[in-house]
Image: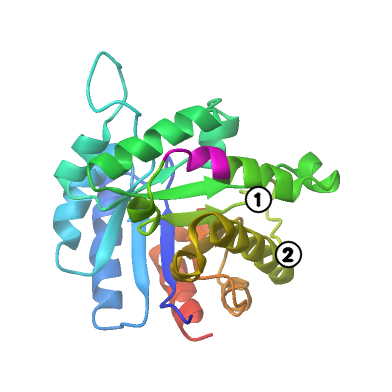
């Protein structure tokens, strides 16, 4: 099934308020009427409301970088899915490699976040991927399978239909190394076949699977030419709006 590319820019802990406001203004103008792509950006929490308001009606989605597994409570410094939804976000990243490997988030915690996101009608983008030693040891499929199965444990079919998955090999995040288009496609096919086995062919075929890992304007088109790559999760190359727009243009014109 041919899908409109879904391109997401993850700012991580970057850009000032002034830079974010200017970025959004430029992005909205450059993408106005461009069509043929889905687009989202992941600002810092403190800019979410301003960015959501600025992008209202533009077709650009605002994606939270993270949520907590609880809706409310004594969790100092955390932000809930309900709060994210209320300010205007439609998606949230869950299980990003930096959350897993820098902050120690487990598969069970990721699964709890997934359930919470769905409970407030916030679409989760489940991030999965292997470390370098796991790829070297031939464990890519087993790692990806476990993260996928544990992340989706006890989640119903109706919710799986709304899911987005991002494959991001940890060894390619911010390193300048990128999985070859063929490597990315191979893992995306494995993910799709795993979903097909567990949830059926229709859901698997409709599923958006994005690639993330040192994506830039030079490799975006080649990655998007792969049949199983439906979009891109862009990190550092999304911090400059001109670079991000170039990636979007190359993705949709592949």
Asked whether 173 falls inside the magenta stretch, the response is: no
- Other-residue count near label 2 (Cα within 10 Å), few / some / many at <14 / 14–19 / ≥20: few
Q: Find residue 186 and report its horizontal and vertical position in percent.
A: 70, 65
Which residue is pictured at 27% across the width and 65% down the height? 60
Residue 239 seen in this snapshot = no
Q: Nearer the viewer, residue 252 or 241?
A: 252
Dot 1 and dot 2 residues touching (CB under 8 Å): yes
Check the image and name the residue furthest to the right: 137
State which quadrant residue 81 falls in: top left
State which quadrant residue 180 falls in: bottom right
Q: Which residue is mark 2?
A: 183
Q: Find residue 42 and report its horizontal and vertical position in percent.
A: 36, 50
Q: Which residue is mark 1?
A: 169
Which residue is pictured at 85% across the width and 43% down the height? 137
Which residue is pictured at 23% across the width and 64% down the height? 25
Q: Nearer the viewer, residue 139 or 181?
A: 139
Q: Find residue 27 and report its horizontal and vertical position in percent.
A: 30, 68
Q: Secondary structure at mark 2?
A: helix
For the image, the number of numbered tags is: 2
Q: Is residue 99 above or below residue 24?
A: above
Left or right: 79, with 174 as reference point: left
Cα distance in 3D space between marks 1 and 2: 10 Å
Q: Is residue 90 above or below residue 65?
A: below
Check the image and name the residue furthest to the bottom: 253
Left or right: 135, with 97 as reference point: right
**Stretch in magenta:** 149-154
């Amino acid at each position: 099934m041919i899908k409109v590319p879904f391109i997401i820019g993850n700012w991580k802990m970057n850009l000032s308020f002034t830079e974010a406001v200017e970025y959004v203004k430029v992005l909205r103008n450059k993408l106005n009427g461009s069509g043929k792509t889905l687009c989202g950006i992941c600002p810092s929490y403190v800019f979410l409301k301003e960015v959501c308001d600025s992008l209202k009606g533009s077709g650009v989605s605002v994606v939270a970088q993270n949520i907590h597994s609880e809706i409310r409570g004594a969790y100092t410094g955390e932000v809930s899915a309900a709060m994210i939804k209320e300010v205007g976000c439609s998606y949230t990243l869950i299980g990003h490699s930096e959350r897993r490997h820098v902050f120690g988030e487990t598969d069970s915690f990721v699964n709890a976040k997934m359930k919470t996101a769905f409970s407030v009608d916030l679409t989760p983008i489940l991030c999965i991927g292997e470390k370098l030693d796991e790829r070297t040891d031939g464990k890519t499929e087993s790692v990806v399978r476990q993260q996928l199965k544990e992340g989706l444990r006890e989640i119903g079919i109706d919710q799986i239909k709304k899911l987005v998955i991002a494959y991001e090999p940890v060894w390619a995040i911010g390193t300048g190394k990128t999985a070859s288009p063929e490597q990315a496609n191979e893992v995306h096919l494995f993910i799709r076949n795993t979903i097909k086995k567990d949830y059926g062919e229709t859901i698997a075929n409709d599923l958006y699977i994005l690639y993330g890992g040192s994506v830039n304007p030079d490799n975006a088109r080649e990655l998007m030419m792969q049949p199983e790559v439906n979009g891109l999760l862009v990190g550092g190359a999304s911090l400059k709006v001109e670079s991000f727009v170039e990636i979007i243009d190359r993705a949709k014109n592949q």
